[in-house]
Amino acid sequence: MVFGDLMGFSDSDYAYNQSRAHSADIFFLKMKAWFWGGFSTLAMFLIGNIMGVFDINIMGWIIDRVSDIWSH
């Protein structure tokens, strides 16, 4: 794992038979997913805003290419 035990537990801590998992284990799995989902969403918003400052418009490029392909 790149970041080690960032949130206090690693993948091997809960890599066992899920039929024996306690509700607290499932809760921590969900919290880890929510944490990384929120973190990645925030990071993508920040990167998108930085790209806008430097006039990098990826969606515009994609739309232009698709419309060029569609018109030919």
Image (spheres, rainbow, N blue to C red):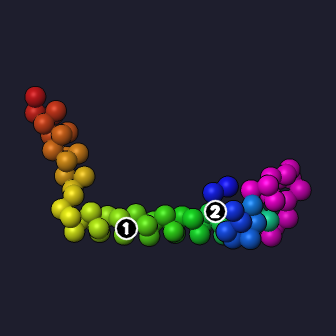
**Vertical comparison of 68 with 51: above or below:** above
The residue at 18%/40% (across/down) is 65
Between residue 17 and residue 13, name the one nearer to us: 13
**Amino acid beneath label 1:** Phe
Q: Which mark is residue 45?
A: 1
First reached walking from the N terminus: tag 1 or tag 2: 2
Relative to 48, 40 lies left or right: right
Gap in Å between the C-alphas at discs 1 and 2?
Answer: 22 Å
Identify the magenta region. Answer: 11-24
Provide residue 70's location: percent of width, then percent of height: 15, 33
Question: Which amino acid does the dot numbered 2 rest on?
Answer: Phe
Q: Nearer the viewer, mark 1 or mark 2?
A: 2
Q: Secondary structure at mark 1?
A: helix
In the image, 17 versus 14, the foreground residue is: 14
Residue 46 visible: yes
Determine the secondary structure under disc 2. loop
Residue located beneath label 2 in the image: 3
Q: Does the image show residue 28?
A: no
